[in-house]
Amino acid sequence: MANSTADVVICGAGIAGVSVAYHLAAQHGIRRVVLVDERAPLSLTSDKSTEAYRNWWPGPGDEMVSFMNRSIDLLEGLAQETDNRFLMNRRGYAFLTADRSKVRQMQDAAAETSRLGAGPLRIHPGATPYTPAPAEGYSTQPDGADLLLDSDLIHEYFPFVSDDAVALLHPRRCGWLSAQQLGMFLLQQARAQGVQFISGRVTGVLREHGRICAVKIGDKTIATRSFVIAAGPLISQVARLIDVELPVFNELHGKISFDDYLSVVPRSAPLMIWNDPVRLVWSKDEREELAADEETRWLLQTFPAGVHFRPEGGEHSSMLLALWTYDVEVLEPSWPPRFDPFYPEIILRGLARMVPRLVDYVGRMRSLYVDGGYYCKTRENRPLISPLPVDGAYVVGALSGYGIMASQAAAELLAAHVTGETLPDYAPAFHLSRYDDPRYVALLDGWDSVAGQL
């Protein structure tokens, strides 16, 4: 016998679950929504985010660009509503290369993303001057991207980067925000509209005539006809409670923060990404010592492109936040996650290829902190936002490393599925049924699970 009744029960109170609760209650007027999590809200992976956002996504197709544009629209609306309570900026991302053979590839890829709907591509030197992004604020800024193809121009605006940088791509509808402030605002608003948070674990999901009829939380049972799985890296485990296997896997991704006490990087810098493979910066003696030991020789290999960082905190902070997806493997989630003891030094030495003066912190990093979380992903690195084969069950997940930026469009789409509202054009791209389409499955053979991933 049920202890209570809800219109919707949501398993998971990360940014996805909290956002769904907000959209159902505040935007659709569904008051009897129950949000369930055995941990504090926003504490499993949502608080491990780099908190960045972008509309700059590759194809195939324009679905990810359209999806992210919509999510950023919603984020900007919330920022306006709250007087930018969650400190949204629009500094952009800056992709750099020192490889002249990659410049044409960078330009062609940028032109393609522009055509997908991310905004115009401006090339410099050119008809219009390059204008750097302000450190704060999100409005009245250009979209699209600026491609700087002159080394002197690059170093005029980014004097701290390596002297051999020959091209810089600066997508502009990008930046970062305070994920915790955003999430807590959404949770407060949801609760004000009647959403109830229950601390506990979903232990069972009951069905009647093939349809969801109740959810068990410990020794309590809540009668409901709608059950949303928003459990981040645990969505597969929860889906098995209703005998559904989801095509997802998990990778552990870390990040570091440390004190830039030498003021190497301007506090107004955008998120900076080195687009070339990297050999770590070592002295001659260090290289000889590493080469002599089988257990450390791997540190002399060429590491993949993508090491990146951004300033963390306000103008009076001196912290940098950095990460690098150089070595990931599929893992079953466990807590607390464990990271390679070499990880901070590898990131720092990789960053020194892009910003040479950061090498001064080798052996001298202060206030070093390492953390991270699991990226729950599909094979093609696109989300699952969809009804499930069990009537009344839904999933919003596989948001990989882009859960914060995607949260509002994902929640809006999931709420539309639950309420029967008109779906946006990009909805089929994130539906579980896409894997039933032979043409889509054939397309996956040439699709990379790191597509769009930093």
Image: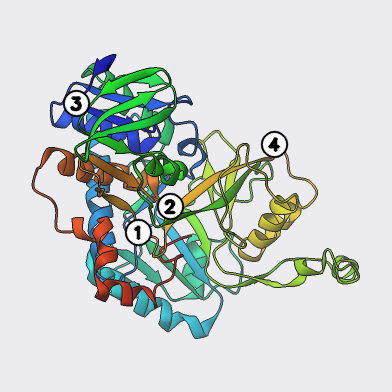
Q: Earlier in the sequence, mark 2 or mark 3?
A: 3
Residue at 35% over, 49% down: 244
How much space separates mark 4 and mark 1, taking CA atoms?
35 Å
x, y (%) of residue 20?
27, 35
| Viewer-proximal residue among 206 and 277 | 206
**Mark 1 vs mark 3, CA separation in Å:** 28 Å
Amino acid type, label 4: Ser
Query: In terms of sequence position, does the residue under pointer 1 or pointer 3 come before the other?
Result: 3
Residue 367 circle label: 4
Find numbered disc 2 in the image and state the secondary structure of the residue it sits on.
Answer: loop
Q: Around disc 3, counting alpha carbons within 10 Å, would you say few (fewer than 14), some (14 to 19), or many (20 or more)?
A: some
Q: Which mark is residue 7?
A: 3
Q: Of the residues tagged 4 and 3, which is closer to the observer?
A: 3
Tell me if residue 9 comes above or below residue 451 in the rendering. above
Alpha carbon distance from label 2 to label 3: 28 Å
The mark that comes first in sequence, 4 or 3, is 3
* Cα–Cα gap, marks 2 and 4: 28 Å
Label 2 vs label 4, nearer the camera: 2
Res 382 label? 1
Say which label, 2 or 1, has the lower sequence index.
Answer: 1
Residue type at the position of mark 2: Ser
- In the image, what residue type sits under mark 1? Arg
Numbered badge on residue 400: 2
